[in-house]
Image (cartoon, rainbow, N blue to C red):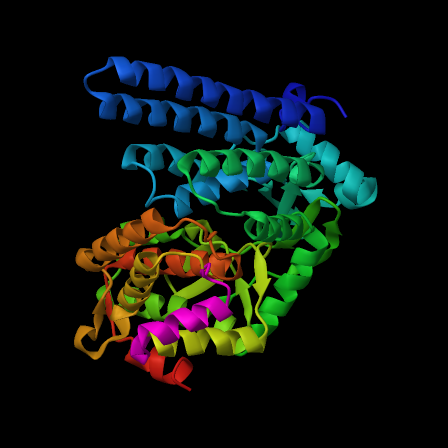
Amino acid sequence: MGDSKKSGGAPASLFSRSKELVGLFAKLGQKELSGRVSALLSENSSLKKLGLQVDQAQALVEALKHLRGAAMKAGQMLSIEARDFLPPEVIEILNQLQDQSESMRSSIVAQILLKELGPELLGEIRDLSEKPIASASIGQVHRAKFRGQDVAIKVQFPGVAESINSDLFLLKKVAEAFIKVSGKEIRLEGLFEELGEILRQEVDYVSEATHMEEYATMFAGRPGYVVPKPICELVNGRVLGMTYESGLKPDEWLSRNPSDEEKTALARKVLDLYVIEFFENGFVQTDPNFGNFFIRPESGELVILDFGAMKRYPPSFVLQYKQLLRLIRSGTPDQIIEHTRAMRLLDPRESAECMQAFVSMLKLSLEPFEPQHQPFDFAMSAYSSDMRQSSLHFTKLIRYSAPPHQILFLHRKLSGIFRLIQAMRVKIPLQDYWENFVSV
């Protein structure tokens, strides 16, 4: 397979991708080395360091926008998970990965459709949009008509599936090197295994079509939710066809200044969505991107998109998680620590100070459910600020504990839901959620 730089795609061969990643990290390493020398010679080393980090982040973004796949997906996760570890200037640059990726030319899209669907089915696709209506790290989506029906067709970028293992191998080596320099002794095997599992699932469009159908069954008979339906004839290899579902992105909907009643109704719908996913079914769409939701202003319906990053949680884990929440609220610190160790969320070698900071952070996280905070004001900046400070204090004390891969993607979904409702600036009583789904 040739280098698809020449054809408008990501570098498809494993050699070319590995070469680009190694070159990128070498470039970042040179910046780090030269930055350290400059910092020694500068009276204002903190500004030098910040400028270095900004340069590194910008170089990372530019490279990952081109590489896509596992490399870009990991960069997207970094922009979310590392916001407590990096300066806001760096996070602002990394946030570009949430919305930017180079798209394939229409000629490449046509070639993939022909290869995956064959000439007969391709001939039944009409009015295929020249530009994608959505584009991310794994593929891009085009609007079209198929047998007279409005459809959305997701087309996977060439080489993404084949590059997952090599991308993750290189990224893991680089992450481990940075950890070693920091003086921490954190093993990342579990985290990267979890990430690899999700990524391999995301490139399996046949599996995604099955997930879409199962997810629709979960919400059958529940008004207010819309799930696309896969078009079986258009599910093959790197192509996933589905019914086209219209709606506004959350930021577009909010720009129309909906009423407080409309915002509160939608916020409840989003909270109920999580309850149905995790507490009732143990089947969670874990991608926190706002772009996975559309809103229909006329009906108030919530359209749910993208079923690649699905995660199953067995009933035993849900019960264990609920027990943890109950202990955080009313148990002793020793009981909380014992339970988190049983769930393998915290390494027992951590210091007593680190464990106490962990308990404090967990207790603070449940403040929105306390009676004195009802209804909880999602626009309350003090809570978000306190959580960030508590999280930052805890992460500074960590020496052995890797990000808990068992709940990493679950909490990514939770953080996405919180940020979405926070943007609505609404007040919602949360005690009923606790009584109905946690305390039982």
Q: In this image, 215 relative to 352: left or right? A: right
- Residue 150, given in percent of the width and then of the height, sits at 60, 52
Residue under the point 73% across and 52% down: 235
- Residue 438, given in percent of the width and then of the height, sits at 40, 80
Q: Residue furthest bottom?
A: 440
**Residue 316 in which image quadrant:** bottom right
Of 425 and 89, which appears nearest the observer?
A: 89
> Which range is magenta?
329-348
Q: Can residue 330 be seen here?
A: yes
Of 257 and 387, which appears nearest the observer?
A: 387
What's the magenta bit mostly, secondary-structure-wise? Answer: helix
Q: Magenta span has 342?
A: yes
Q: Is residue 12 above or below residue 400?
A: above
**Residue 324 in which image quadrant:** bottom left
Mark count: 0
Residue under the point 63% across and 55% down: 242
Q: Is residue 429 above or below residue 388?
A: below
Residue under the point 51% across and 26% down: 63
Q: Magenta span has 86?
A: no
| Quadrant occupied by the C terminus | bottom left
Q: In this image, 323 relative to 48: left or right? A: right
Q: Can residue 222 be seen here?
A: no
**Residue 335 in which image quadrant:** bottom left
- Residue 348, given in percent of the width and then of the height, sits at 45, 61
Q: Is residue 306 above or below residue 7?
A: below
| Quadrant occupied by the N terminus | top right
Q: In this image, 39 relative to 197: left or right? A: left
Q: In this image, 349 relative to 19: left or right? A: left
- Residue 181, given in percent of the width and then of the height, sits at 44, 33
